[in-house]
Amino acid sequence: WDKFYYNNNNMPSITARNNDRELPKPRWEKMIIVGHSQGASHAAYLAQTKILPGAAFLSGPQDECQNCSPNTRFWIDEEFLTKEITAFAYGDEEGEPTLPIIEDNWKRMNVWSRPLRVINFLDNNGGYDVCKYPIVSTIPPSDTSLCTRRGHCSVAADQSTPYLNTTCGEIIPLYSLGVWTDLARVGQCDR
């Protein structure tokens, strides 16, 4: 973990946690932040306030200004210091009831080119580009899901994620075959 923190007093950062020493400072320039659901909002806030190599938001951010006039600005409208950002959500309001809020936030962030294009990763034979657009999936979540918002949960690694059964009896999460890897490479995007 030391590569992600500046060491203080040549102490391993993981052990420099007592009251008489300054805690280690994160090396934000070495961290790609990925968050799901509320974690997507945390990742978005860090991407807005820190210069990161990249950030990815799964099922979020879902923040909204309730009962505000339509032109009210809030934190999501401010400039983002991190430029290499991508996002992934379930693309159906039945499985992801907050999809309109998420897409509105993606627009408000002003990170992607205008007009905002949200690409379903199944379109164009999988020809999506996480560096250019946020992506959505309309692949139904697993029917073994216990999540009340199955689509919302399905884009992260849990029992809602759609999966493939191989002839060898393996169960492979569908998004592990490309989407999650592509999201994690967001730091290689060049905006």
Image (spheres, rainbow, N blue to C red):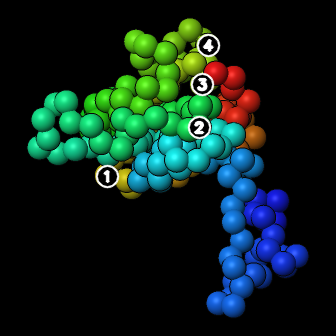
Task: State if disc 2 and disc 4 touch (CB < 8 Å).
Answer: no
- First in sequence, mark 2 or 3: give its number: 2
Mark 1 highlights which residue?
148
Q: Which structural element holds mark 1?
A: loop
Label 3 packing within 10 angstroms: few (<14), some (14-19), many (20+):
many
- First in sequence, mark 2 or 1: give its number: 2
Q: Amino acid at mark 3?
A: Val
Label 1 packing within 10 angstroms: few (<14), some (14-19), many (20+):
few
Quarter where residue 17 is shown: bottom right
Q: Amino acid at mark 4?
A: Gly
Q: CA distance from mark 1 to mark 3?
A: 27 Å
Mark 3 highlights which residue?
130
Mark 4 highlights which residue?
127
Label 4 packing within 10 angstroms: few (<14), some (14-19), many (20+):
few
Left or right placement of residue 69 versus residue 90 in this view: left
- First in sequence, mark 1 or 3: give its number: 3
Left or right placement of residue 103 versus residue 135 in this view: left
Q: Which structural element holds mark 3?
A: loop
Label 2 packing within 10 angstroms: few (<14), some (14-19), many (20+):
many
List x then y, in percent, for residue 113.
49, 15
- First in sequence, mark 1 or 4: give its number: 4
Mark 2 highlights which residue?
82
Q: Quadrant of the C terminus?
A: top right
Q: Residue at x 28, y 31 (%)?
A: 100
The foreground one among 36 and 144 is 36
Q: Residue at x 42, y 31 (%)?
A: 109
Q: Nearer the viewer, mark 2 or mark 1?
A: 2
